[in-house]
Image: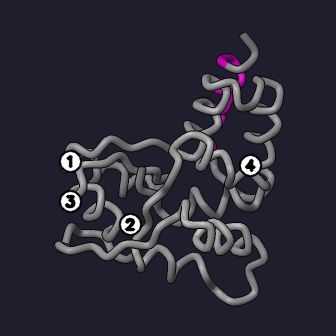
Amino acid sequence: MISNASPLIFLSKIGQISLLKKLFAFILISKEVKDEIFVEGKPETIDIANAIKQGWIKVVEVKDNIPIGIEGGESSVINLARERKDKLVIDDSIAIKVAKAFDIETIRTTTIIFMAVEKNIINKKQAISLINKLIDIGYYISPTYYSAILAKLSS
């Protein structure tokens, strides 16, 4: 599994970066994503730095970083997923559309929480709490999608 910066940052901010390790064993990120994550004065990066030191988040070079119409970390992880024929955790809607144009399977941060419920890592009540924490720290979920999430987790 490959990840963009925002899922790592958001999961770290709510204390749930370990969900990625429990679900996927390891995560690949590009150097560009690492550079986006490690901005001075961001306390949430400590857990990400520890995961890199532990080796379950691995920083890898993108070999064929072709221009795809978007910049930065999103471009590099889409190219990495294209190279490795792997799935991608990403939240940016434009980047998701670009990834899908390359036939790259994408999932969002909220999908990680649903997957954790499906694997019995967390329960539905915990999942609702985590979704609400994401929203509290600035993760955008449309009211329609939020209603659908609550309905799915309340059943």
Circle 1 is placed at which residue position? 101
Q: Secondary structure at mark 2?
A: helix
Assess whether residue 143 is covered by the magenta stretch. Answer: yes
Whether pointer 2 and pointer 4 mark residues with C-beta atoms closer than 8 Å, the reply is: no
Of 150 and 50, the residue lying toward us: 50
Check disc 3 and give the amino acid type: Glu
Front position among marks 2 and 4: 2
Circle 4 is placed at which residue position? 135
Of 22 and 135, the residue lying toward us: 22
Q: Secondary structure at mark 4?
A: helix
Provide the residue span drawn in magenta.
Answer: 141-152
Residue 48 drawn at (x, y percent): 65, 68
Residue at figure coordinates x 69%, y 74% from the top left: 45
Q: Secondary structure at mark 3?
A: helix
Q: Is residue 91 visible?
A: yes
Residue 68 drawn at (x, y percent): 21, 67
What secondary structure prevails in the magenta region? Answer: helix
Whether pointer 1 and pointer 3 mark residues with C-beta atoms closer than 8 Å, the reply is: no
Query: Mark 4 and mark 3: span between their CA atoms?
Result: 33 Å
Check disc 2 and give the amino acid type: Glu
Of 107 and 145, the residue lying toward us: 107
